[in-house]
Image (cartoon, helix red, strand yellow):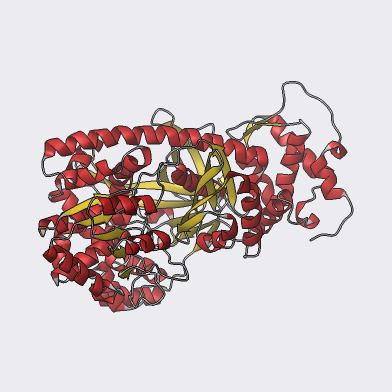
Amino acid sequence: MAMKKWVVGKCDRALAKELAAECDTDPIVALIAAGRGLTDPMELEQFLSDEPFFQHPSELADIQAAARLLEDAVAAGTKIAVFGDYDCDGVTATAILCHYLRGRGADCIYRIPDRFAEGYGMSVEAVEEMKEAGVGLIVTVDNGIACHREIARAKELGMTVIVTDHHLSKDTLPEADAVVDPHRKDCPSSFKEICGAQVAFALICMMENREPEELIPYYADILCVAVLADVMPLVLENRCIVKYGVEKLRTSPAVGLSAVMNVAGLDRKTLDAGRVAFGIAPRLNAAGRMGDAGRAVELLLADTMMTALTIANEIDADNALRQKTEKEIFLKAITLIEQNGYGHDRVIVVAGEGWHIGVIGIVASRIAERYGRPAIVISIDGEKATGSGRSVEGFPLFETIAASSEMLSRFGGHQSAAGVGLPTEAIPQFREKINETAALKPYIPPTLHLDCKLTPAALTVDLAEALRVLEPFGPGNQAPVFGLFEVTLVRVTPIGQGKHLRLIFSKGENSFQALLFGVTADAFCFEPGDVLDAAVTVEPNLYNGVYSVTVQIKALRMSGLGEEVFAGMEAFDDFMSGRSRKKEWLLPSRAEIGEIYKTVAEKTRVEERIKYLFSGRIGYGKTMVSLAVLEELGLIVKEADGRLHLPKEQKRNELQNSGLYRRLTERGETV
């Protein structure tokens, strides 16, 4: 994992005290809210309120025209096709609108493109097929904003076309009869961060001439899944939808969603936004990732539990296969990244033959998290290639990809996630071009945001209970993260068959226990006695009628590291990718290289520990150069899991035999 820059939120305790008194809330809640920008009492009260809050659908450009066109089509008996997308947002939007129109007596079918044969969005062939089937009106959901050619063909054939989408629009809009998209440049809507299913819901509200607050009780569960699956920020109406939706999923979910929860083994009593995001949404996504997304639509439209359970079991099997396939591709991608040095690029672009295009987006997310930089994973199919990218905080991925549009056959998405299509032969050129563009932007180190600092004594059940008022947690409203600085690691105990760790820390007279999930003892880089900074979350835990507080580790680092480590990180990456050579940040002395060698020689160590031990003393860049030179000379061996040790056969070598070392020591300008 990449080292992250820890940023502690600004805590105005005086303001927080005033907010707590005025809004009658816990002081720690007010402190966190103020640090997140909720400094106005009315805003905070609205945020904490259980009352529904929505922007009016009429704020969306063209939505009134879209509603009239659909009303006319329903009244005239015109055959309507809802054209959706194969991801969770797309299938939920399709199900919402199709169910509503059929309930109004409309002659309504739906069409989801095949991810593998057709790809994202409408095709001319699909338009012509819908025309042959007697469709007179097409309404897109979660797509369409980029389908200029396809919509033009539909108009040639005499069809009415309504676009409802939420993706970024290009300079010109398609020539549809109505285009509803909060991101079109002339849309006056006040809140833009809504998903495709929400746009479809707004259209239903407009057709019914009713306020969203009136209809949300009927649609909250399915909208909740869509919002969480599409990683919308949990603020304003998104927060309201998820809050209502989780409650509806607990008490009276739709038949299809109830079946998914049964198959997934989700306990409704403990259901929360996180369990919806990781338990329900991936299964609906799996239908389109691994096969026919139409099954997910049929699941959501099912009116009997027997039908719903049959489909839910099928897509649960798809989800298991998805997980297996994703893991295999991730490991292959990591191998290629390490072998080719792509991990030093500003944007990682990695490609493989025949990689399953249904999971490359998830793999891109995992790579972006691992390396702390945007990643685009590309699947090669002969002369054509398809890619999916995920960004990191502060990096405009869509904008950066757009600068390479001349070599792409297609692209689309958001600033945080995007898809591309391109000729296979253009992949190296695309990698070079996108990194040239990215290098013009300021270097953004991976960042971890902490709400505030705490002492171990503050980790109480009362704290955990007080924080529940801030739920639901998710993007844009993450669970509060607290920093405990200069705590001493006392004991490390493997739990969960060795897959996780229980850690004991102390500071002064206080001690606390914390859980670290997904890390084995062999991969853990810290040792008892280390003085660390810990980033943690807390939540209440009820067991055998007794409440306790569960402390979960989000990140650990050696105490005392300064921000100069990130300048060294930038210098090392730029040097390894050939962009610049800043010797003062990178060139270690023979003694420094020797000291690192001796440390590895003492015993097998995780590379991350070497980074922490030496970055504060000689600098991150020099530490990483030393490790790279020693590995290049065969003096140390780095395993796939990051462990470092000496080779079985010891040998002597000279630094000048390292090409990397020679590149640094040869004469030349420092860039």
Q: Quadrant of the C terminus?
A: bottom right
Residue 174 drawn above or below residue 471? below
**Horizontal side of residue 169 vs 438, given as left or right:** left
| The one of 404 and 588 positioned closer to us in this rendering | 404
Across and down, in percent, residue 209 comes to 14, 72
Q: Residue furthest top?
A: 649
**Horizontal side of residue 153 vs 239, given as left or right:** right
Q: How many marks?
A: 0
Q: Residue at x 36, y 75 (%)?
A: 187
Residue 204 position by quadrant: bottom left
Q: Quadrant of the N terminus?
A: top right
Across and down, in percent, residue 638 comes to 66, 33
* Residue 391 visible in the picture: no
| The one of 622 and 360 positioned closer to us in this rendering | 360
Across and down, in percent, residue 297 comes to 24, 46
Across and down, in percent, residue 443 comes to 62, 61
